[in-house]
Every structure is written in structure tokens, then in C-alpha cells.
Amino acid sequence: MDGDRRPAQGGGVDMVMQVPEDVYDRTAAFYRDALGYDTTEEETGDPAAPRVLTVDLGPATLRLELVPGAAPADFRIGPRGLPG
């Protein structure tokens, strides 16, 4: 599509990225604002992951979990229904 900056996606998997607190807002803004994906954010009430941003990648879903104390490389990938 003309003007669509989002990369084409395929697959059908759910991905979860555990994001450190100090970069969570910038990471969420990147997917939402810079790439233009549809997103939904929720407050979970869970101190281990108090905020989660779900990014709709078409056939795949990316969950960005704000995890206090997380290392930048904490990343999991798996089939739909991956426990969050």
C-alpha cells in the first residue's frame, strides 16, 4: 500500500517482550506512533508486570510487558495462547 510504513507480517504467533521500566514508554511509542500499529494498553494490577501493551501485527500479536528489573534481552516467542 502507498504510504503504509508498517512491515508486512505473517505467521500467526504471539510474542511477549518483557521490557525494562526505563524504556517501556519509548518502546510502546515506537510500535504505536513510529510504526503505526494498532495497540491496546492495560493496567494489570500485577506488580510483576503492571502494564501491558498489546500490538496487533495482523496475524501475530506482540505483548510488551513492563517488568520492573527486566533485562533488555528478556524475550519469549510461542504459539497463540502463550501465557502472559
Image (tube, rainbow, N blue to C red):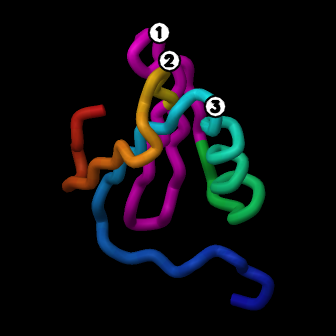
Picture residue at 23% right of the left edge, 34% below the top: 83
Q: Is 4 in front, or is 35?
A: 35
Q: Which residue is mark 1?
A: 45
Location of the N terminus by quadrant is bottom right
Residue 18 lies, with reference to residue 3, above or below; the image says: above
Q: Is residue 46 above or below residue 49?
A: above
Query: Which amino acid, mark 3?
Result: Asp
Q: Earlier in the sequence, mark 1 or mark 3?
A: 3
* Residue 52: percent from left, percent from top: 50, 31
Q: Residues within 10 Å of mark 1 (few under 14, many from 20)?
A: few
Give the image location of residue 62, x and y in percent: 44, 51
Badge 1 element: loop
Indicate yes or no whether the magenta region holds residue 76: no
Which is closer to the viewer, label 1 or label 3?
3
Q: Is residue 45 above or below residue 62?
A: above
Residue 57 screen position, x and y as percent:
49, 62
Secondary structure category for the residue under label 2 = loop
Q: Amino acid at mark 1?
A: Gly
The Cα atoms of the two marked residues, 1 and 3, are separated by: 19 Å
Q: Which residue is mark 2?
A: 50
Instruction: Please give the range of residues in magenta.
Output: 40-65
The 10 Å Cα crowd at callout 2, few under 14, some 14 to 19, many 20 or more, is some
- Name the image quarter holding residue 48: top left
Amino acid type, residue under disc 2 in the picture: Pro
Mark 1 near mark 2, Cβ–Cβ under 8 Å? yes
Q: Is residue 64 above or below residue 46?
A: below
Q: Which residue is mark 3?
A: 22
Tell me: 78 left or right of 74. left
